[in-house]
């Protein structure tokens, strides 16, 4: 009877926690012979339920206020002691199916916090919104316009910091409005999408555009965030569908490990939908045709040339980044109009997501970037 009750307790959780269907036979029939084992199983299933099934919305780690709100984003201002003579650092978060909290992930693990701790208090982040039926036909122009609205709200000139896809958007903006960008930082940003050997590049060139159009059609004009999440997971099937859960199970009694797992999964599993038009533009015009570096992309009514970017530039890539290979970031140097002496480059010891929220990158690679931005600000103020 005791064994039956233990089995039923797990099966009851299983019914409400169906995100890992292949694992349920294991957890229902193995190791239920002791109370401690049962508790371990139940704790494991509770964690999975909270992160994989319920998927709570991620939260911002640091205090901020909404400066302006558009139908594409909320502009979050993290400054506390605003110096009106200082230029804002505007972080363009990735807009690729996950939320913008990656820029302010957790206390002690936040890019925003790194800026503030190393001398720049004037920091703002684009908090991208989930696309809707009302915005499904928005294209890249709508997001360039939104960035321009943010820069105007912050004083008309900004130090633009682009993370991943926020980087090519920032590069487009700097090419379109070069006088509004004081410095441009591109971190893990695919600029020359033909460079290197990454899985996103391979996917874009392997599948016809009709494949991506069908994905958008399945989302009724939207690229569903869950589709993008599935694609990211499929790049590392073993890790995403087994290894990380096996590791969680082994460490389930470690509260700190559980908390870190839940924190990351609450961000990773919570997705945003993208406008279908925006997504198809990115696939076709940026990744298939590489129009930005060819000077053929039209943004806000003008054919954009990266040669029009003359401001100081900092390029940061991840050595093991399989989303944006280092070559896609570093080859930006070849196309911009910035003097070579004004271009800084750094290769971080890590992968893609770690560039924005990993302890190592935040402690070793970003403080020099903050110091560099501050030095350019001081130089600008002296002119």
Image (cartoon, grey):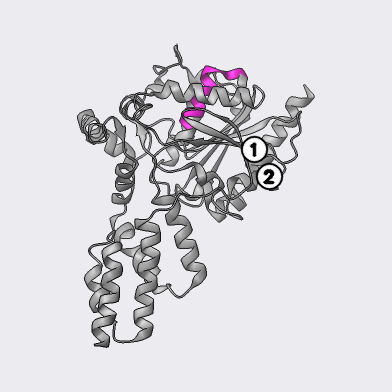
Q: Nearer the viewer, residue 46 or 154?
A: 46
User: Above or below — where is 217 with respect to 317?
Assistant: above
Q: Secondary structure at mark 2?
A: helix
Label pair 2/1, CB-CB below 8 angstroms: yes
Q: Is residue 293 visible?
A: no
Residue 59 shown left or right of residue 190 in the figure:
right
Q: Quadrant of the C terminus?
A: top right
Which residues fall within the magenta stretch? 167-179
Q: Which mark is residue 316?
A: none
Disc 2 packing (10 Å; few <14; some 14–19; many ≥20): some
Residue 228 in the magenta stretch? The answer is no
Q: Which residue: 40% across, 65% down?
A: 47
Q: Residue furthest right?
A: 382
Q: Quadrant of residue 155?
A: top right
Pick whichever of labels 2 and 1 is earlier in the sequence: 2
| Residue 361 place in picture, x, y as percent | 56, 50
Disc 1 packing (10 Å; few <14; some 14–19; many ≥20): many
Predominant SS along the magenta part: helix
Q: Nearer the viewer, residue 284 or 312?
A: 284
Q: Which mark is residue 123?
A: 1
Q: Quadrant of residue 122?
A: top right
Q: Residue furthest top?
A: 301
Q: Secondary structure at mark 1?
A: strand
Residue that label 2 marks: 116
| Residue 233 place in picture, x, y as percent | 32, 51
Q: Which residue: 61% across, 36% down?
A: 124
Q: Quadrant of the N terminus?
A: bottom left
| Residue 127 place in picture, x, y as percent | 51, 37
| Residue 36 place in picture, x, y as percent | 38, 84
């Amino acid at each position: 009877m005791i064994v039956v009750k233990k089995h039923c307790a797990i099966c009851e959780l299983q019914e409400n926690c169906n995100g890992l269907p292949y694992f349920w036979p294991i957890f229902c029939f193995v190791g239920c012979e002791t109370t401690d084992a049962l508790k371990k199983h139940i704790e494991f299933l509770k964690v999975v339920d909270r992160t994989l099934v319920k998927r709570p919305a991620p939260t911002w780690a640091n205090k901020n206020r909404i400066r302006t709100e558009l139908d594409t984003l909320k502009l979050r201002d993290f400054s506390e002691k605003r110096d009106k003579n200082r230029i804002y650092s505007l972080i363009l978060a990735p807009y690729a199916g996950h939320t913008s909290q990656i820029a302010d992930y957790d206390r002690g693990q936040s890019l925003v916090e790194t800026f503030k701790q190393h001398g720049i208090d004037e920091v703002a982040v684009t908090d991208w919104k989930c696309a809707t039926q009302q915005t499904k036909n928005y294209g890249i122009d709508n997001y360039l316009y939104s960035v321009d609205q943010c820069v105007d709200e912050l004083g008309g000139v900004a130090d633009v910091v682009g993370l991943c896809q926020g980087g090519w958007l920032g590069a487009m903006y700097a090419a379109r409005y070069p006088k509004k960008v004081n410095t441009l930082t591109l971190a893990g940003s695919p600029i020359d999408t033909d460079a290197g050997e990454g899985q996103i590049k391979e996917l874009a060139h392997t599948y016809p555009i009709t494949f991506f159009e069908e994905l958008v059609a399945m989302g009724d004009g939207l690229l569903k965030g869950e589709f993008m999440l599935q694609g990211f997971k499929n790049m590392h099937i073993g890790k995403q569908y087994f290894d990380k859960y096996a590791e969680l199970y082994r460490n389930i009694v470690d509260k700190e490990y559980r908390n870190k797992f839940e924190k990351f999964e609450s961000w990773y599993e919570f997705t945003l939908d993208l406008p279908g038009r925006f997504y198809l533009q990115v696939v076709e015009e940026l990744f298939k045709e590489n129009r930005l570096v060819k000077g053929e992309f039209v943004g806000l009514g003008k054919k954009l040339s990266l040669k029009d970017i003359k401001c100081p530039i900092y390029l940061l890539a991840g050595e093991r980044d399989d989303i944006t290979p280092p070559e896609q970031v570093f080859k930006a140097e070849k196309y911009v109009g910035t003097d070579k002496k004004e271009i800084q480059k750094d290769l971080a010891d890590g992968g893609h997501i770690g560039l924005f929220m990993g302890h190592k990158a935040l402690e070793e690679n970003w403080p020099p970037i903050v110091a560099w931005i501050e030095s350019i600000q001081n130089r600008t103020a002296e002119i």
